[in-house]
Image (cartoon, rainbow, N blue to C red):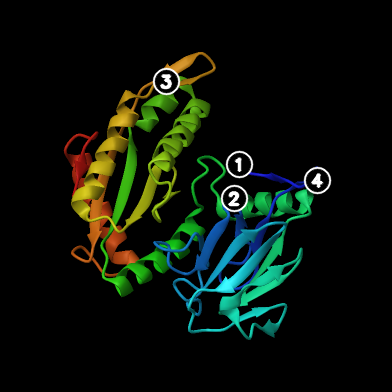
Amino acid sequence: MHTETHDDDVVTRPHLVVLQGPGLGDFFEITDDELVVGSDPFRADIVVRDVEVEPCHAEVYREPGRYVVRGVGAGKEISLNGEVMEEPGGGHPLSDGDRIHIGDSVLEFSYQDEIKASFYEQLHKLVNRDHLTGLFSKERFDREFEHRLGVTADEGRPLSVLMADIDSLKKINDANGHLLGEFVVGEIGRIIGTLHQGEGRIATRFGGDEYQTILPGLPKIEATEVAEEIRRRVEQHAFERGGTTAKTTISIGVAGYPEDGATRQELTHAADAALYRSKRAGGNVVSD
């Protein structure tokens, strides 16, 4: 994690947090010298889930001793602390506590309060993350799915969906206890998470031992390769906890937009049907 130290040795954590809008509570740490703010998960570094926000609406960048916000050719206005930026492309310096208004969302910029930054970050995790796997909570995942599917459809890009289910988790629970089984669920979630970092990819724990993921911009044939990599890593992984080791496998179904459906519900149903085919084939299989 990148932090900054000014000349006075005060450790800072520059960040933006959504105070108002569909993405309420979203926390974004500013770790680069130049970041695009917008609604497009393919082009924006800070993705604001707001239909009134342009795909690339604003840019936050660093100058010596300060951060600056400017518009990036946005057709919609930007306000700073409630006042419309008359020349949004010219750049406006940001002070601690400044509020950036874009679309129906308000983002607060801050960098001087480490405690507040940690609070917002932890709150974001509590609200949006599954405690066992670290993946998105189901509710947050569904909102992201809808948003990213909409962007995908608007831009004519493909999108793929994976549904996965652990094979024979009950045997692990019966042989070694539910604590090891719970550990396996969490570890597999982390395996899936490592393959869903960046490029708009996200994942969730769909149920007790099921997972769902989306891969924006990836056609089904390429998503199948990702699914095979997940299957291979789980098969090869030794799940060790408290001196006890277990092995298991995973079954995965793959569906693609637009060929298998045009809505979140249709794509979920199609991926789930493919998962069922993997289970009927004996498990440890990827099906499309």
Residue under pointer 4? 10
Q: Is residue 38 above or below residue 177?
A: below
Q: Crowding near pointer 2: few (<14 within 10 Å), some, many (20+)?
A: some
Instruction: For residue 104, say whether it is visible.
Output: no
Residue under pointer 1? 1
Judged from the image, the secondary structure of the residue bearing numbered disc 2 is: loop
Task: Give the camera-side residue of 79 and 151.
Answer: 79
Q: Amino acid at mark 1?
A: Met
Q: Earlier in the sequence, mark 2 or mark 3?
A: 2
Q: Earlier in the sequence, mark 3 or mark 4?
A: 4
**Disc 2, disc 1: CB below 8 Å?**
yes
Q: Position of residue 112 (x, y in %)?
A: 78, 54
Q: Residue furthest right?
A: 8
Residue shown at 25% from the left, 49% from the top: 223
Q: Looking at the rendered structure, which numbered label has been put on residue 175?
A: 3
> Mark 3 against mark 4, which lies toward the viewer?
4
Q: Quadrant of the N terminus?
A: top right
Residue under pointer 2? 31
Q: Is residue 232 above or below residue 60?
A: above
Report, in whole angstroms, how far the alpha carbon at label 4 lies from the one at label 1: 16 Å
Judged from the image, the secondary structure of the residue bearing numbered disc 3 is: helix
Q: Amino acid at mark 2?
A: Thr
Q: Amino acid at mark 3?
A: Ala
Q: Amino acid at mark 4?
A: Val
Report, in whole angstroms, how far the alpha carbon at label 2 lies from the one at label 3: 46 Å
Q: Crowding near pointer 4: few (<14 within 10 Å), some, many (20+)?
A: few
